[in-house]
Amino acid sequence: MSDETTSRPAPGKVSAESVTLHIEQRVRPDAVVRYEEWLRVIAAKAAEYPGHQGVHIIRPPAGHNEYSILIRFASAADAERWTNSTDRRDLLAGIADAFERDDQFRIEPGIEFWFTPPSPAQKKPAPWKQWLITTSVIWPLTMLIPPLFKPLFAAVPILGVWGISHGIIAATIVALVVFLIMPRYVHAVSRWLFKPAKG
């Protein structure tokens, strides 16, 4: 199983319009230690950019050398600001010799990334599977999260005002789905999720 590192966003910072910058980097085995140090530096630098909402690093299992880095931004424009920045370009230039190939990246809207097949030869899962996975994550959260906030809303009435309370709850649910639950859930059911339909 791959090793994962997640930097969580501040409460209320994630929105449904957020995008995921998905970066794949294939690292030479003899450069992993140097790469890991570099990874911490570039992750910290990306966090300084406007719209940054957290990073999720998926390290390869034993015997493999491809890292996946998922960085959430508030908008596609924020993600592009980082990908086109001088800071990112200079940091990549300093580690380029550690890669077996140039890094690959793409910007994925919403949570669509989680339903992208791990292999180009595979097809996206059927819409009903995507619906079932997403519903099975969000449904229990809509029952569990609101009661947890009741003491806070009672203590700070302004936060319990209609609209504000909904925003806080929605932001919390989206953050949990995107950064904590969905990565692990999709990984756990990936064999079933990406299994081709019979016939």
Image (spheres, helix red, strand yellow):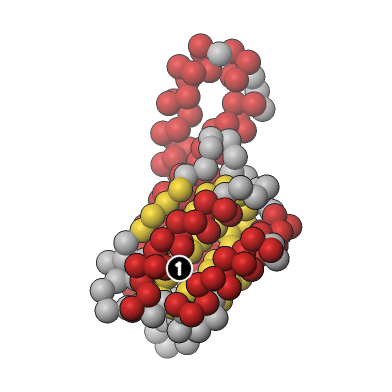
Q: Which residue is mark 1?
A: 68
Q: Is residue 29 visible?
A: yes
Measuring from the top left, give residue 34's x and y in whole percent: 39, 68
Q: Tag 1: residue type?
A: Ser
Q: Which residue is found at the position 54% from the left and 71% from the top?
A: 94
Badge 1: residue crowd in 10 Å (few <14, some 14–19, many ≥20)? some
In this view, 126 is above or below 45? below
Q: Which residue is found at the position 27% from the left and 67% from the top?
A: 1
In screen coordinates, is 181 left or right of 61?
right
**Which residue occupies the foreground of this view, 23 or 12?**
23
Q: How many marks?
A: 1
Which residue appears farthest toward the front when viewing the image?
A: 94
Measuring from the top left, give residue 118's x and y in whole percent: 44, 76
Q: Which residue is found at the position 40% from the left and 84% from the top?
A: 198
In this view, 44 is above or below 87? above
Q: Which residue is found at the position 69% from the left and 62% from the top?
A: 85
In screen coordinates, is 15 left or right of 199?
right
Quadrant (top left, top right, bottom left, bottom right) of the C terminus: bottom left
**Which residue occupies the foreground of this view, 126 or 26?**
26
Measuring from the top left, give residue 121's x and y in whole percent: 47, 87
SS state under label 1: strand
Looking at the rendering, which quadrant does residue 22 occupy?
bottom right
Measuring from the top left, give residue 25's x and y in whole percent: 48, 74
Q: Is residue 110 visible?
A: no
